[in-house]
Amino acid sequence: MYVTLSETFATDQCPSTREVPRQPANDRHLTRATRAGETLFAEGDAANHLYEVVTGAVRLARVTITGRRQVIAFGFPGDVVGFPHNRRYHTDCDVIQAAELRAHPRSILDTPADNPILHRYLVNAAMAEISGMQDHFLMLGRKSASEKTASFLSVLLMRIGTISNGVGHVHLPMCRGDIADFLGLTTETVSRTISQFRADGILGLTTAQDITVFDPLALRRLSELEE
């Protein structure tokens, strides 16, 4: 959910085959279909459910009192979103690509004996979120604009893209403004950096959202110049 490069990048494997955690056995769940633009929950709402992303994508964000937005994370298939603070959501969550979501009762966090398998599954998801958040903080504080953008595109390729014969393809479910607000950059900087990657022959654009990565390893190396 925190798009960072904490995993090993392998070009001989198709990233879309990443194993998505299966629904825990004996879990009573509610599957919900959502449309792009729909708000799943808002900051401060009572957190009655946690949501497992089955298909599609969601965006978690917070807005300051001055109106500035920070995108906190994106949720892709296999991610769980909506972990609460004091039983309330502490971000907004909007659907950015038509999604199927599996709702799990938040109460299981307080009563693990009711469903120990589901409780263990959600705790593991929360631990993965903490680890990803720490990696993301490192990226925000220590990487240049070029490195941040390369990291972001590399991980999207792993998470929701495909690689065939050494060439990657990925559809971006988010806009440039979302990327900028996630990486702590301006929209202009993100667009300029992607244009530079195109000029260098690392990637190409079929549309603004559809990217072909001609050299995934070169993109990965750009993300690690100062590591």
Image (cartoon, grey):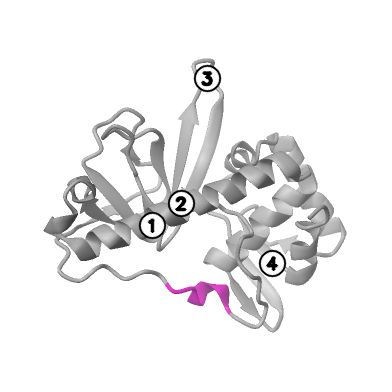
The residue drawn where x is 44% and y is 74% is 19
Mark 3, Cα crowd under 10 Å, few <14 / some 14-19 / many 20+, is few
Q: CA distance from mark 2 to mark 1?
A: 6 Å
Q: Is residue 123 magenta?
A: no
Side of 91 where 150 appears, left or right: right
Spot occupied by residue 123 in the image (x, y as percentages of width and height): 33, 55
| Residue named by callout 1 | 125
Q: CA distance from mark 1 to mark 3?
A: 30 Å
Q: Amino acid at mark 4?
A: Thr
Side of 166 where 127 appears, left or right: left
Foreground tag (3 vs 2): 2
Q: Is residue 16 magenta?
A: yes
Q: CA distance from mark 4 to mark 3?
A: 34 Å
Q: Which mark is residue 67?
A: 3
The residue drawn where x is 58% and y is 45% is 175
Q: Are marks 2 and 1 in contact (CB under 8 Å)?
A: yes
Q: CA distance from mark 3 to mark 2?
A: 26 Å
Spot occupied by residue 71 in the image (x, y as percentages of width and height): 53, 38
Foreground tag (1 vs 3): 1
| Residue named by callout 2 | 129
Q: The magenta stretch spans which residues? A: 14-19
Q: Are marks 4 and 1 in contact (CB under 8 Å)?
A: no
Q: Amino acid at mark 3?
A: Gly
Q: Amino acid at mark 1?
A: Ala
Disc 3 secondary structure class: loop
Between discs 1 and 3, the one toward the N terminus:
3
